[in-house]
Structure formats: structure tokens, C-alpha cells
Amino acid sequence: MFKYVIRRLLIAIPVLLGVTVINFIIMKMAPGNPVDMLISPQTPAAALEAKRIELGLDAPAYVQYWSWFTHLLRGDLGYSMVTYEPVGRMIFDRLGPTLLLMGTSLIIGVAIAIPLGILSARRQYSKLDYAAVTGSFLGISIPNFFLGLGLIYVFSLWLKILPSSGMSTLGGNGGFVDILLHLIMPVIVLTANVAGRNIRYVRSSMLEILEQDYLRTARAKGLKETLVINRHAVRNALIPIVTVLGMEIPILFGGAVVIEQIFSWPGIGQLTMSSIMSRDYSTIMGLNLLAAVIVILANLLTDIAYALVDPRIKYSK
């Protein structure tokens, strides 16, 4: 397993390099640049050119990329072209709120999806099964932004019991209860999406396992139904479920962009949107690199989880 992990990490290096090159090319193809976003259209052309030279935008694209890449090799993601803050510190400051939002949503969504999916499969065509499947389709079908705006209208504008935006109340002490109240609505939106997607996968996987002959044999030997389900069925159904859960981390990272904008959550998603709107090249490159690292690590953790769930899987080469 150790050799397998090392090999995967080594393979990830050229993959990350390729991702940065592609991201840089796409970014340079987009219309506009940081100078156009920062300075009024009435600014003289000489002043605009001076600003481009100051930011290094007058150099050829390959020179700009090489300059960014050499700084990256020294552990430096550069400085924002808008705020002039270190990009690494900007990302680090925003990473905590995003991890809190994503982690809470993922844990609650999985805690709902797995037991509900198992019960739905065990009681196929029952009222519980129909309710779970209907709830699953609703969770997938309702757009995040629509559900988010609906929750804001009901709980913030109508009932006035939850804050509509931010991570803490302005002028408050930002304590645990305050953060929890601000966390409720964005977590509900993301959890509905996570649970909605995974209930169907868990149900389908369990239905396939429940039809296997070895479960009938276990029942014929007199094993209790709870033992048959928990020890034999669930463990064998976890392999496809692990695959889906491994994909949730990158999906949540992308979904948080919309949710953080709606609820003004001070995380990576909000930083991503503001960087795109201002054409902040250095910050966009840093965020894209972070997203690529998250995808690679999520895939690696999924492969490791396979071996933990099913001892028959060996990574010996």
C-alpha cells in the first residue's frame, strides 16, 4: 500500500503541471485583464500601459507562466493583482470556513443517505421507499441557488429566526452559537443535494446485494436478519458507495461557489468568484491548483478506502 501511495503521488506531479498549463491558457483566452477591471475607461492609454508593465502583463504568455511557476517551486503563489496580498495567505484564510461548510454538509448528508438508502432497499415498494426516492429526486432536482433563496425568504425575511448571510453577526463576538446559526441554511442546501444523490446509489447497491445467493444461505443457516444485513450485505455494498462518496468532495468544492455567494459565506467559493470577476490571474491560478490537488487527494483516498472496505483488494504493484 505504501509503495502504491508513493507512486500515485509521483504521478500526480505531471498531472498538476498539466492542469496549471491548461488553466493558464484558458485564463489568458478569456476577455479582459486585471488592468481593465481596476482602472476607469477614461484613464489615459499611457497610464494603462504603465500598469500592465508594473503587473508583468506586457510580457509574452509563456514568460508570465514561467515566472509564476518558478515562484511556485519556491512555495510562493505570488501576490493578488487586486489587493496585493499574498495569494497563499488569502487562500489559507478562506480555507477554514469552506472546510467547515463542506465537512458539515458531507457528514450530515452521508449520515442521512446511507441508513435511509439501506432501509429503502430492505422495504422496497413500501411507503418509506417511495418517500425516500421522492425526497432523493427533489434533493437532486431543486437547484442550489433556488433552494438557498427560498430558505432566506422563509427563515430570514418572513420568520426572522436565522441570519441571511455571513459567518458571524457584525459587531458580535462570533461565538459558537452565532456561527452555528449562520451555518444552518447553507448546510441545509448542500446536505439536501448530497443526501439526494447518495440515497439512490445506496438503495441501488443494496438491492443488488440483497439478491445474492450467499445472503439466502446466511439466512438459511439461521443468522439474524440484522446480522445478515450489517455484516454481509452492507459491507459488500460499500464498494460502489465509496466511489460515489469519493466524488462528493470535488463536487462540494464546486457547489460551495454558488452557496457561498448566495449566503455571503467568507470561503474559497466567494474568493473564486471575486477573483474571476476582477480577472485576478495570480489568485485564480492558486485556486485552480488547490482544486486540482483536492481532486487528486480525493481519488487517492477513495482507492485507499477500497482496500479498507474489501480486504480482497490489494495494491501490490
Image: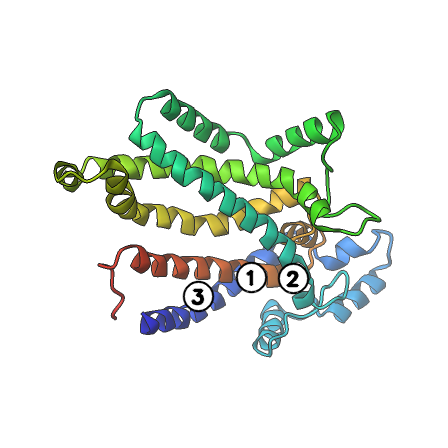
Horizontal arrangement in the rendering, residue 156 relative to residue 224 (left or right): right
Horizontal arrangement in the rendering, residue 193 relative to residue 244 (left or right): right
Q: Residue at x 59, y 46 (%)?
A: 256
> Dots 1 and 2: beta carbons under 8 Å?
yes
Label 3 or label 1, whichever lies nearer to me, is: 1
> Residue 91 got which mark?
2
* Amino acid marked by disc 3: Val
Q: Position of residue 152 (x, y in %)?
A: 69, 32
Q: Secondary structure at mark 3?
A: helix
Q: Residue at x 49, y 41 (%)?
A: 109
Q: Position of residue 41 (x, y in %)?
A: 83, 51
Task: Compare residues 72 and 142 and report the one nearer the observer.
Answer: 142
Total marks placed: 3
Task: Compare residues 205 and 232 and report the one nearer the observer.
Answer: 232
Q: Earlier in the sequence, mark 3 or mark 2?
A: 3
> Residue 15 got which mark?
3
